[in-house]
Image (spheres, grey):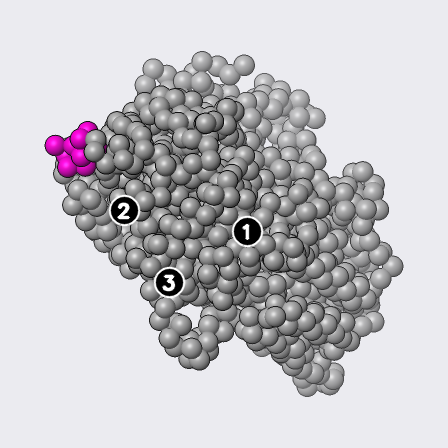
C-alpha cells in the first residue's frame, strides 16, 4: 500500500484565521480517499495548498515521495495531480470541446504552434465528453450550459490531462440524484482503471458508498481516519459535526 | 464543421482586405488622403499588435504607445548612430525591443492584473523622462531626424511606398495572430483570459505563456513604431511616448472586438475616422478629449466585447431568445461563483 | 460561429467606406486661379493642448494681418482668406494638417505654426512640396540645420542671439562691478534653452563662472528644489530660459528662499502683461529680451499697433507681432513676385525673400541661406513699474539698472 | 559636494512634498483596497479641485482654502456616485482591467472639460502670502508649502482616526481585508465601498486645494501626477494606507535629494525605478499590504 499524497504538519493562516493547524495526512495510492469535515474545517484550503494554489506557511507536502511544497500549480498538475474546484470552474466563453482541449500540454514551442484542434487530441477529448455523456454539447459555450453539465465538463477537462491522482472538491455539490449516481459510478470505474481519488464531500451517502479510506478534518487538522465502517461509528466525528 | 467555414471566411476577408489595400493608393485623389490612409493602417497594425496581449490573455496594456515609440527611436538611432541600412535597423530595433520586453514582462506579469496596468503606464512615463533627459543620445526635446530610406522619392511617391509597407506589416501581424489563435498555445492563452487559476491547475504554465505573447506583441508594436519613424521622419519624446496613443489602441481593439482577428482593424478604421470627425466637429476646443473619453466609457460599460460582436449577439438574441435567457442565468451564476471563490483564496 | 461572417463583411465594408469617405471629402476644391478669387493662406496652429496659449496669440496676429491687408485692398487685388487648422499641439497632427492644406485644400500659400517642436516637421512637409514657409516661432538653431531652402524665421534673431546685447553690455563693464558667477535654469525646450545657453556661452567665454546649470521638463510645477540649488550657490546673476508660467514659478520659488541676485534675466515671461501681478509686483530690475516693442519707431508698427488696438482693444504682444511680421514677409514676396499659387511661383517667392530685406513691425529683416535672420533682440527691463527698452543704447527708453533692487 | 545648508533645505522641501504625496496616494490606495480598482482619474479630480480653488479665488476672491467647504462634500458625493453608478456595474471577473479603462475615460473627460472651461492656459493662484517664508536653522520654509503640508497631515490623521476608531472605519477595514467575510458578519459592503470611494475622492479635493496654493495648474497636469502616485501605492503595498504614506514620504524625500546631483528630470525616475524594483523583488510591497500578492 504506497502513499499517494502526503502532508506533514501543514499550517496556513489568513490574517488571524487559522485554516490549517498542523495537518499531517497521508492518502493511499490507487484508492478512493475521502476528506470530510464540517464547514470551515480547512478542507478546501488543504486542496489549495497541495495543488500549489496558495502557499502554506509551513509544513511538508510530498506526492509519491517527492517534495512538491514549493512547486507551481502547473508543475504539480504535470506531476499527475488534477483537481476540480468547489464551485466548479470552467472557461465560460469557450466551447465544451475547447474546455477539454485546454488541458492538452503542448510539447515545447513547436507543439505549441500546432493546431489546437489536432485530430488525435480532438478524438481523445470527444472520447471524454462521450464518456461523461455531454458529447452533444461539444460546440456549445460552457457559460450556456446547466450547472450539472458544467460540473461534468470540468471533470472531463481534468481527466483530459490524464492525472494519476484526481482531487474532487464537492463533486456532489448542487447536482440532482440521477447525476449523483453517475458521478459515483464514474469515480469507481476510473478508480478501477488505476486512478487515485481524493474527494472532499458533504454528501455522506456518496462518501460512504464510494470511498475506501476516509480522513475527517476539524479545525484545520485530522481528528480521525479509517474505512467508512469505522468512521460511521466514531463519536469524535459525530462530535465534530454536531458541535458537541 | 463550423470552424472550417470560419477559416474560409477569414480567408475571404483577407483577400478582400488585400484588394482594398492594393487599390487604395490609386483611388486616393491626393497625397493627403494617402497619408491619412497610412495613419489609419498604422493604427490598425498597432491595435492588432496590442491585441496579442489584450485579446488572448485579457491583460490590458496602456503602454503600447511607449513600445511603439521605443521601436521608432531604436530604428532612428540605429540608422543615425550605427549607420545601419533603414530596414535592417528596423528589424534589429524590433529584436531589441522584444528583448527589453522580457524584463518588463518579468516585473509586470508575475503578479495579476493591476500591477500590469500600472507598469504599462509607468513604462510610458519613464521612457518619456529618459528620452527627454538623455538629450546627448536621443536628441531630447530638440527632436531626432530620421533619414529617409528612399531619398530620391517625391513625397506622394514616398507615401505610396509606405502605404504598401504598412499594409504588408498589417498582413504579417494578422497572419501571426491568426496562427496563434488556432494553436494550442493560443488555446492556453484564451484559457488564461477566461480563468487564470483554472488554466494553471490544468497544467498551463501561465506565466511563461503571458511572457511569450507579451514579447511577441512588443516586437510587432516596435515594427509598427519603427516603420512609422522611417515614414514620418521626425521624432520627439513628447509625441512618441504618450499615454493617449496607448489608450487609442485599447479603444480601437475593444471597440472592434478583441476576440476576433479583424476586430482591432475594424476598430482602427472606426476610431481613426472618429478622431478626424471629432477634430473637425469640436474645432479648437479640447472637447475631442471628452468625446474620446465618452466613447471609451460607453464601450467599457455596455459593449466590452466590441461593437461588431455586440451587434452579432443582438441579432442572435432575437433569433434564439430561449438560449439568451439561459445565458443570463449562467452568467450571473458565474459572477456569484467568482465572488465566493475569492473568499477561499 | 456564423457571426464571424458578419464580422468579416463588416470589416471589409468599413474598409471600403473609408476609402470612399476619404476620397469624397477631398473633392475638387483646387480652384483655378483668377483675379477675383481670394488668396487662401493655410496655417496649422496649436489652438488646444499644451501650446494653445501662445498658439492663440499667433492666431490673432495672423487674423490682424489678414484684416489690415484686406482693408487696404488685399494682395495683387485679391482678398486674403485664412484657413486655420488646430494641430492640438501634436506633431503628427501638424504634419497631417499641412498635408491637407497643401494636398487636399490646395491653398495658395502656407505659413508656419507655433513652437519649435512643431516647426521642424511642418517645415519638412512644406519643403518637400516646394512651398515657401515663413514661420513666426521656430527660433531654435536646430530649425536651421535641416537644410530647408524655403524656410524663413520672421523675427529679428534666433533664440541663441536673444541676449547678445546684454552679453556685450556685461562684458564691457569694469571687472570689479561685473557679476562673477551666474546661475542658469532653462526649460527643456529648444527655444527656451537656446536663449539661456546663447548667453551662457558668451558669458563663460567672458570669464563669468557658471555655478548652477539646471534643465527642467516643461511639465515642472514645483521649482522648490531648483530654487534651493540656485539660492545655495549665491550666484551674482540668474538667467531663466523660461516661457511664461515656469518663469513666474521659478521667481516666486526664489523669492520664497529670499535669494537676491544682482541681475535677473528671464526669456518671454517678464514681457507678459500678467507678469507683474503674478510675482506680486516685485518686478523692479527684471530683464527680458524681446524681439518686439509696441513703441518701436518702425512705420508699419505704428499702423499695426493702432489698428490692432482698434480691433482687439489691447496692445499686441510679441506672439501677435511675430505672426503679423510673418504675414508682412509673405506679402512683400507676393507683391514682388506678382504671383501667389502652388508650383513654380513658390520658388520665385523663396528666391525673392533670400535676396531682399523686408521692412516689418520688428524692423528690417534679412536672412542667411538657411533662413536664419541676421539681427539681435532688444533687452527690456522693469524700471519704475513699467517694462522699458534699456539695450541697445541706440533705442533705449531708460537706463540699465544694475545691480537690481531686491525682490 | 552640496553644502549642508542645501542638503537641509532639500530635506525640508522633500518632507513638505512627501506629505502632499502621502495624502494623494492614500486616496488612490484606498480605492484599490476597497474594490481592486486602479483609479486613474484620481489625479484628474485632484486637478479639478485645484481649478475650483483657483477659480473661487480668482473669480470670487475667496481664499482658496475656503473652497474646500464646497469641494470636499461635492467630491465625496461624486465618489459615492462613481462607485455605485459605474464601477459596481462592471463584471467582477474583469473588474480590475475594465475599471482602469473606465477611470481612464473619466480622466480624459475631466481633462477635456477643464480645458473647455478654463482653456489650456497655465493658472496659478496669486496669494498675498504667496512668496512669504520664514527661516528655520538656515533653511527657508514657504508659508504656502507649510499650509499644504499641514492640510495633508491633518487629513491623514483624520483618515487614520476614522479607520481605526469608528465603526465605519472598522467596516471599511473589514471590507478591504476580506470582502465576503465582512458580508458574512452583516456589513453592507456595497454601501461601505461607496462611502470608501467618497472618502478617497474627498482626499483628492483636499489635496487639489493644497496643490493649488503653490503650483501652476493646467488641464493635462494630472498625467504628471498619476505616475508617481501609482508607483507610491505599489511600493507601499497595494491597499495599505500606512504603507502608501510611508512610501510617499520616503520617495518624496529621495526625489528632492536626488535633484541636487541628478537634476529635476532624472530625479523623477526614482519613482519608476522603485516601482520596477518592488514588482521584481517584492510584489506585495515594502510596507505590508498582502493584497498585492494576488493583484
Which quadrant would residue D285 be assigned to in this image? Answer: top left
Majority SS type along the magenta span: helix
Residue C338's image quarter?
Answer: bottom right
| Marks 3, 2: nearer the viewer | 2
User: Where is the C terminus of chain C found, in terms of image quarters?
Assistant: top left
> Residue C328 sits in which quadrant?
bottom right
Image location of residue D184, percent across then percent down: 20, 44
From where the camera sits, is residue A200 visible? yes
Residue B241 pos. (x, y %): 59, 47
The residue beneath circle 3 is: A146
Give the distance between the C-alpha atoms of the residues marked 3 and 2, in whole angstroms: 24 Å
State the mark number for residue C114.
none
Res A102 label: 1
**In the image: residue D246, left or right of residue C194:** left
Give me the residue at 60% from left, 45% from top. Answer: A105
> Could you tell me which quadrant the N terminus of chain C lies in?
bottom right
Mark 3 Cα shell of 10 Å, populated few (<14), some (14-19), many (≥20): few
Q: Residue at x 46, y 42 (%)?
A: A191
Instruction: Decide which of tag 1 and tag 3 comes sooner along the chain.
Output: 1
Please report whichever mark, 3 or 2, sits nearer to the chain's N-terminal start. Answer: 3
The label on residue A205 is 2
Q: Is residue C335 left or right of residue A8?
A: right
Residue range (magenta): A235-244
Label 1: element kind: loop
Looking at this view, name the residue that lies furthest to the right: B152
Q: Can residue D294 be seen in this view?
A: no
Amino acid at each position: 500500500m504506497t502513499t499517494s499524497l502526503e502532508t506533514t504538519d501543514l499550517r496556513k493562516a489568513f490574517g488571524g484565521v487559522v485554516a490549517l493547524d498542523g495537518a499531517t495526512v497521508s492518502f493511499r495510492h490507487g484508492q478512493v480517499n475521502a476528506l470530510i469535515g464540517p464547514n470551515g474545517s480547512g478542507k478546501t484550503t488543504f486542496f489549495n495548498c497541495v495543488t500549489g494554489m496558495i502557499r502554506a506557511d509551513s509544513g511538508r507536502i510530498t506526492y509519491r515521495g517527492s517534495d512538491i511544497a514549493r512547486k507551481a500549480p502547473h508543475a504539480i498538475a504535470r506531476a499527475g495531480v488534477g483537481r476540480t474546484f468547489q464551485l466548479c470552474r470552467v472557461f465560460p466563453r469557450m466551447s465544451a470541446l475547447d474546455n477539454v482541449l485546454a488541458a492538452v500540454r503542448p510539447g515545447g514551442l513547436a507543439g505549441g504552434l500546432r493546431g489546437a484542434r489536432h485530430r488525435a487530441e480532438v478524438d481523445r477529448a470527444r472520447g471524454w465528453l462521450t464518456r461523461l455523456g455531454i458529447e452533444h454539447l461539444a460546440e456549445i459555450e460552457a457559460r450556456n450550459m446547466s450547472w450539472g453539465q458544467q460540473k461534468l465538463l470540468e471533470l472531463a477537462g481534468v481527466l483530459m490531462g490524464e492525472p494519476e491522482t484526481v482531487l474532487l472538491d464537492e463533486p456532489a455539490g448542487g447536482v440532482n440524484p440521477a447525476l449523483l449516481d453517475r458521478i459515483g459510478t464514474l469515480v469507481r470505474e476510473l478508480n478501477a482503471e488505476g486512478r487515485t481519488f481524493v474527494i472532499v464531500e458533504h454528501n455522506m451517502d456518496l462518501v460512504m458508498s464510494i470511498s475506501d479510506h476516509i480522513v475527517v478534518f476539524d479545525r484545520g487538522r485530522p481528528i480521525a481516519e479509517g474505512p467508512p465502517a469505522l468512521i460511521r461509528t466514531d463519536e469524535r466525528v459525530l462530535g465534530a459535526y454536531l458541535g458537541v | 464543421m463550423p470552424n472550417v467555414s470560419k477559416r474560409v471566411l477569414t480567408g475571404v476577408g483577407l483577400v478582400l482586405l488585400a484588394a482594398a489595400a492594393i487599390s487604395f493608393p490609386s483611388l486616393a485623389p491626393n497625397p493627403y488622403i494617402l497619408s491619412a490612409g497610412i495613419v489609419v493602417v498604422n493604427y490598425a497594425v498597432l491595435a492588432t499588435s496590442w491585441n496579442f496581449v489584450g485579446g488572448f490573455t485579457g491583460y490590458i496594456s496602456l503602454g503600447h504607445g511607449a513600445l511603439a515609440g521605443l521601436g521608432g527611436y531604436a530604428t532612428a538611432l540605429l540608422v543615425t548612430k550605427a549607420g545601419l541600412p533603414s530596414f535592417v535597423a528596423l528589424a534589429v530595433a524590433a529584436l531589441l525591443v522584444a528583448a527589453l520586453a522580457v524584463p518588463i514582462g518579468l516585473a509586470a506579469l508575475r503578479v495579476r492584473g493591476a500591477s500590469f496596468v500600472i507598469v504599462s503606464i509607468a513604462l510610458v512615463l519613464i521612457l518619456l523622462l529618459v528620452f527627454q533627459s538623455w538629450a546627448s543620445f536621443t536628441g531630447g526635446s530638440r527632436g531626432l531626424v530620421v533619414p529617409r530610406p528612399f531619398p530620391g522619392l517625391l513625397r506622394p511617391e514616398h507615401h505610396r511606398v509606405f502605404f504598401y509597407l504598412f499594409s504588408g506589416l498589417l498582413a504579417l501581424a494578422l497572419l501571426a495572430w491568426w496562427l496563434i489563435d488556432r494553436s494550442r498555445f493560443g488555446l492556453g492563452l484564451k484559457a488564461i483570459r477566461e480563468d487564470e487559476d483554472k488554466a494553471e491547475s490544468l497544467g498551463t504554465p501561465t506565466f511563461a505563456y503571458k511572457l511569450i505573447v507579451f514579447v511577441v506583441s512588443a516586437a510587432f508594436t516596435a515594427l509598427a513604431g519603427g516603420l512609422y519613424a522611417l515614414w514620418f521622419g521626425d521624432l520627439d519624446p513628447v509625441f512618441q511616448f504618450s499615454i493617449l496613443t496607448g489608450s487609442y489602441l485599447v479603444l480601437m481593439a475593444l471597440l472592434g472586438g478583441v476576440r476576433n482577428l479583424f476586430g482591432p482593424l475594424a476598430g482602427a478604421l472606426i476610431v481613426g475616422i472618429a478622431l478626424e470627425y471629432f477634430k473637425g466637429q469640436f474645432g479648437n476646443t479640447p472637447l475631442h478629449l471628452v468625446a474620446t473619453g465618452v466613447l471609451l466609457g460607453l464601450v467599457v460599460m455596455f459593449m466590452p466585447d466590441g461593437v461588431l460582436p455586440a451587434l452579432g449577439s443582438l441579432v442572435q438574441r432575437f433569433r434564439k431568445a430561449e438560449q439568451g435567457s439561459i445565458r443570463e442565468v449562467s452568467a450571473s451564476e458565474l459572477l456569484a461563483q467568482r465572488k465566493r471563490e475569492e473568499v477561499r483564496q | 460561429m456564423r457571426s464571424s461572417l458578419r464580422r468579416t463583411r463588416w470589416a471589409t465594408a468599413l474598409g471600403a467606406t473609408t476609402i470612399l469617405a476619404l476620397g469624397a471629402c477631398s473633392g475638387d476644391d483646387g480652384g483655378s486661379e483668377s483675379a477675383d478669387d481670394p488668396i487662401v493662406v493655410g496655417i496649422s496652429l496649436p489652438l488646444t493642448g499644451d501650446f494653445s496659449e501662445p498658439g492663440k496669440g499667433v492666431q490673432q496676429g495672423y487674423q490682424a494681418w489678414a484684416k489690415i491687408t484686406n482693408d487696404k485692398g488685399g494682395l495683387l487685388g485679391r482678398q486674403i482668406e485664412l484657413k486655420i487648422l488646430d494641430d492640438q499641439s501634436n506633431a503628427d497632427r501638424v504634419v497631417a494638417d499641412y498635408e491637407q492644406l497643401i494636398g487636399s485644400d490646395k491653398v495658395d500659400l502656407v505659413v508656419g505654426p507655433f513652437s519649435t517642436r512643431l516647426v521642424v516637421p511642418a517645415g519638412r512637409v512644406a519643403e518637400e512640396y516646394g512651398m515657401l514657409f515663413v514661420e513666426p516661432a521656430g527660433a531654435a538653431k536646430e530649425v536651421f540645420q535641416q537644410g530647408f531652402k524655403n524656410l524663413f524665421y520672421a523675427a529679428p534673431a534666433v533664440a541663441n542671439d536673444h541676449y547678445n546685447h546684454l552679453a556685450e553690455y556685461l562684458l564691457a563693464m569694469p571687472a570689479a562691478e561685473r557679476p562673477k558667477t551666474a546661475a542658469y535654469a532653462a526649460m527643456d525646450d529648444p527655444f527656451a534653452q537656446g536663449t539661456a545657453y546663447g548667453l551662457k556661452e558668451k558669458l563663460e567665454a567672458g570669464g563669468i563662472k557658471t555655478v548652477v546649470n539646471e534643465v527642467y521638463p516643461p511639465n515642472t510645477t514645483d521649482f522648490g528644489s531648483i530654487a534651493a540649488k540656485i539660492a545655495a550657490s549665491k550666484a551674482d546673476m540668474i538667467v531663466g530660459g523660461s516661457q511664461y508660467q515656469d518663469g513666474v514659478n521659478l521667481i516666486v520659488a526664489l523669492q520664497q528662499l529670499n535669494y537676491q541676485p544682482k541681475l535677473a534675466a528671464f526669456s518671454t515671461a517678464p514681457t507678459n502683461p500678467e507678469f507683474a501681478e503674478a510675482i506680486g509686483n516685485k518686478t523692479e530690475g527684471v530683464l527680458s529680451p524681446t524681439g518686439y516693442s509696441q513703441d518701436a519707431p518702425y512705420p508699419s508698427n505704428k499702423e499695426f499697433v493702432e489698428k490692432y488696438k482698434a480691433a482687439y482693444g489691447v496692445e499686441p504682444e510679441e506672439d501677435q507681432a511675430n505672426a503679423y511680421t510673418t504675414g508682412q514677409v509673405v506679402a512683400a514676396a507676393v507683391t514682388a513676385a506678382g504671383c501667389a499659387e502652388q508650383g513654380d511661383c513658390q520658388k520665385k517667392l523663396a528666391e525673392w525673400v533670400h535676396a531682399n530685406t523686408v521692412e516689418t513691425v520688428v524692423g528690417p529683416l534679412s536672412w542667411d541661406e538657411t533662413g536664419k535672420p541676421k539681427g539681435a533682440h532688444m533687452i527690456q527691463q522693469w524700471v519704475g513699474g513699467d517694462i522699458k527698452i534699456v539695450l541697445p543704447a541706440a533705442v533705449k527708453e531708460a537706463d540699465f539698472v544694475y545691480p537690481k533692487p531686491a525682490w | 559636494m552640496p553644502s549642508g545648508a542645501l542638503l537641509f533645505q532639500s530635506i525640508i522641501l522633500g518632507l513638505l512634498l512627501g506629505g502632499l504625496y502621502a495624502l494623494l496616494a492614500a486616496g488612490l490606495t484606498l480605492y484599490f483596497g476597497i474594490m481592486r480598482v486602479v483609479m486613474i482619474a484620481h489625479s484628474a479630480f485632484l486637478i479639478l479641485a485645484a481649478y475650483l480653488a483657483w477659480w473661487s479665488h480668482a473669480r470670487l476672491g475667496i481664499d482658496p482654502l475656503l473652497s474646500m467647504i464646497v469641494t470636499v462634500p461635492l467630491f465625496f458625493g461624486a465618489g459615492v456616485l462613481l462607485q455605485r453608478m459605474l464601477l459596481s456595474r462592471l463584471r467582477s471577473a474583469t473588474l480590475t482591467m475594465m475599471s482602469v479603462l473606465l477611470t481612464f475615460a473619466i480622466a480624459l473627460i475631466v481633462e477635456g472639460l477643464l480645458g473647455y472651461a478654463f482653456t489650456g492656459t497655465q493658472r496659478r493662484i496669486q496669494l498675498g502670502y504667496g512668496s512669504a517664508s520664514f527661516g528655520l536653522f538656515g533653511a527657508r520654509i514657504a508659508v504656502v508649502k507649510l499650509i499644504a503640508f499641514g492640510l495633508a497631515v491633518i487629513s491623514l490623521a483624520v483618515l487614520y482616526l476614522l479607520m481605526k476608531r469608528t465603526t465605519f472605519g472598522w467596516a471599511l477595514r473589514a471590507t478591504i481585508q476580506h470582502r465576503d467575510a465582512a458580508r458574512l458578519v452583516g456589513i453592507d459592503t456595497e454601501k461601505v465601498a461607496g462611502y470608501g470611494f467618497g472618502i478617497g475622492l474627498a482626499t483628492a479635493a483636499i489635496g487639489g486645494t493644497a496643490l493649488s496654493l503653490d503650483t501652476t495648474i493646467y488641464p493635462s497636469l494630472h498625467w504628471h501626477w498619476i505616475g508617481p502616485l501609482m508607483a507610491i501605492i505599489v511600493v507601499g503595498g497595494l491597499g495599505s494606507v500606512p504603507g502608501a504614506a510611508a512610501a510617499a514620504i520616503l520617495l518624496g524625500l529621495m526625489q528632492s535629494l536626488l535633484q541636487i546631483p541628478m537634476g529635476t528630470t532624472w530625479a523623477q525616475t526614482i519613482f519608476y525605478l522603485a516601482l520596477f524594483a518592488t514588482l521584481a523583488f517584492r510584489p506585495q510591497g515594502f510596507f505590508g499590504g498582502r493584497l498585492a500578492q494576488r493583484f
